[in-house]
Image (cartoon, rainbow, N blue to C red):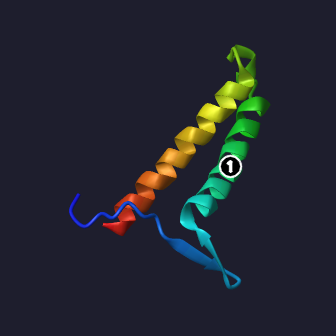
Amino acid sequence: MTGWTGLIGEISIFGFYMPLGIVMAIAALAVASLISRTLARFGVYRYVWHPALFDLAIFVIVMGIFFVISSLRGS
């Protein structure tokens, strides 16, 4: 990766600079929560051994997707 510095960047929200990673984590938490509620509504959690671990895995996957999208937009 030529020119990649490893920094994610910052975003200004009402004059406060926040790391983009925190903003993406909050967005990923919201998306993961929606996915979790949808799966619970359809009864998927009856087949899941550990629901909290499953929710964590959903969050990590969504966060990873957000970071990949962010890195692709930066190049």
**Residue 31 appears at what percent x and percent y?**
66, 50
Residue 59 left/right relative to 6? right
Figure check: 27 above or below 64: below
Q: Nearer the viewer, residue 72 or 23?
A: 23
- Residue occupying the point 62% across, 41% down: 59
Figure check: 30 above or below 56: below
Q: Nearer the viewer, residue 53 or 32?
A: 53
- Residue occupying the point 65% across, 34% down: 56
Q: Quadrant of the C terminus?
A: bottom left
**Residue 64 appears at what percent x and percent y?**
49, 46
- Residue occupying the point 72% across, 45% down: 34
Q: Nearer the viewer, residue 17 or 49?
A: 17
- Residue at the bottom extreme of this rendering: 15
Q: Which residue is identified by label 1?
A: 29
- Residue occupying the point 57% across, 75% down: 11
Q: Quadrant of residue 32?
A: top right
Q: Amino acid at mark 1?
A: Leu
Q: Quadrant of the N terminus?
A: bottom left
Q: Secondary structure at mark 1?
A: helix
**Residue 49 appears at what percent x and percent y?**
69, 14
Residue 27 left/right relative to 38? left
**Residue 69 appears at what percent x and percent y?**
43, 57
Residue 50 left/right relative to 20? right
